Image (cartoon, grey):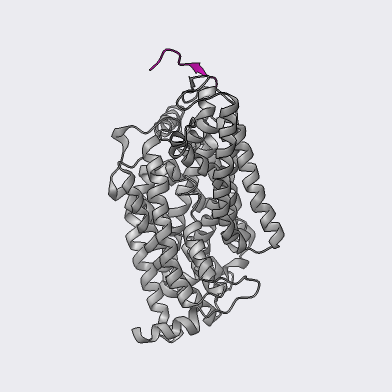
Amino acid sequence: MDTGQKSTLIERLDALYEYDREPVTKDKLHGWKIFWATFAGEHIAGTEFVIGPLFVMHGCTAVDVLLGLLIGNFLAVLSWAFICAPIAVKTRLTQYWQLRKLGGPWLTVAYSAVFGVILCVLAGAMLRVSMTSIALPFAKLFSQPRAEVGTLPQWMWVAIAAVVGSVIASLAVLGFKGMAIFSKMSAPWMVVVFVIAAVATLPMLGCHSPGDFWRVANEKIWTGKVAEGMGRFTIWHVIGFAWLCNMPQHFGMGDMTILRFARKWQMGFCSCAGMYLGHYIAWVASGILCAAAIDRGIATDPGPIAYLGAGLTGALCVVVAGWNVASPTLYRAGLALQVATPNWSRWRVTTVVGAGMIVFACMPAIIKHLDLLVTTNALVLLPLGAFIFIDIRLFPKIGLQPNYAEKTGSLISWPAAAAWILATCFSIAAFVYKGYDPVFPIFLVLPEWIIAVVLYTVFVAAQQRMAGVRAGLCPVATELRPGQTGPVSTKGRD
């Protein structure tokens, strides 16, 4: 490639602007179809082949799963629609830039760095899911007829990760619209494959008619028997996991990144496409596949169980499903870390993060501990999302100044930093007191959110009282524009 061609390519990549540091303009907003596809594509994804089997191995009963997922996913839809979507549409900003307004640039950099790394690990987990399917033909070459893909040579995993990870990173570089188009094409097909694969494996478990299903569900699938090394899940765990596994995205405001492109806040209800097609139908289907694999002594990795149910089509579904969730995750990670690297364009940051994703994907432990990783992600990042919500929704109603760090030119908001640290310490202390239990963190997410809200409100009230701030009046009326590091006086403005 000559210098002119290289320059043209870089210019085209730089033109993929995603309104990283300013509100999305009206001409770039999208309608209902894009968000149905986006939520469906991201949540009918590679994680479904991992999380569905968790309910089987953690000893859930059929009632626990079928009723618990119904309730938990309903709560998740309400959270997207009434918590995250209205804030995203009101501000039109990413959560990183909105956090800068209330927490200051230093706190934002700290949050974005932690969030970016965690998202990079999660994207690596999704890449690993796709790799378990692509590894199937190579497993045959290494004389593994039962598709025990976990014992392939490490160099083979690295090679697969590099190739597949490059495709995922390319999708993330294309930005929101490119990922939405890919989801729009693939989501309906993935739902059909999940259902067909599950139905095809039911006869292997002794279910030959609709009347047999409930008996087989209790005797062969969700039997209430806990696998070795696993904790026991009840219906409350299922409800909590369905509701809270995506809490960083709705209560934690992570999906401001996506929903800022929505024309109306009501488009938050599009999350029901992901929750009920993905986190209900797909989790149930993958649980059935897992039970059939266990019954036949086959590995319960995503690739083998999908191949068992739908052959090559099932294996391909795992690959596409992994892409559908890894790309948006990588996209969010790129936007997060761009806050810490303001002179880099989004595509450059996303490319670097993609390299990190490939490294994490070569670590099989991230799939085995995905449930703990998801809840840890929520516990660490949730408080700052809570601050965005109450800063916009609550503070003007109780006479407190929102976006106080921006208006005073503060580099860091001590109320936000202190509330974040204390709320996180509460969860860590509770986890340590309970003893190691990968199930327990699920129940800490909501209490931590409430504690963070209370602490932040109290600390901000104290800060503004000491500064002599009255409702609607700030002692240093300043405004930080995107990319600006110091305050600019707004004296005399309306």
Q: Position of residue 187 (x, y in %)?
A: 35, 58
Image quarter for residue 445? bottom right
Relative to the observer, which residue lies in front, 444 or 172?
444
Residue 347 at x, y percent in the picture: 47, 37
Residue at image point 65% right, 50% down: 426
When the figure is inspected, residue 73 is found, relative to residue 53, above or below; the finding is above
- Where is residue 375? Give x, y as percent: 57, 56
Q: Nearer the viewer, residue 404 or 156?
A: 404
Q: Is residue 335 above or below residue 363?
A: above
> How many badges with numbers are in the image?
0
Q: Is residue 105 left or right of residue 78?
A: right
180 falls in the magenta region: no
Q: Main secondary structure of the magenta part?
A: loop
Magenta includes 492? yes
* Residue positioned 44% across, 59% down in the render: 45
- In the rendered image, residue 218, in percent from the top left (x then y), is placed at 47, 82
Residue bounds of the magenta highlight? 485-494
Residue beneath the point at 30% across and 41% down = 263
Is residue 109 visible in the rendered image? The answer is no
Q: Residue furthest top?
A: 492
131 vs 229, left or right, is left
| Residue at the spot 50% in from the left edge and 30% down from the top edge | 101
Is 439 located above or below residue 338 in the figure? below
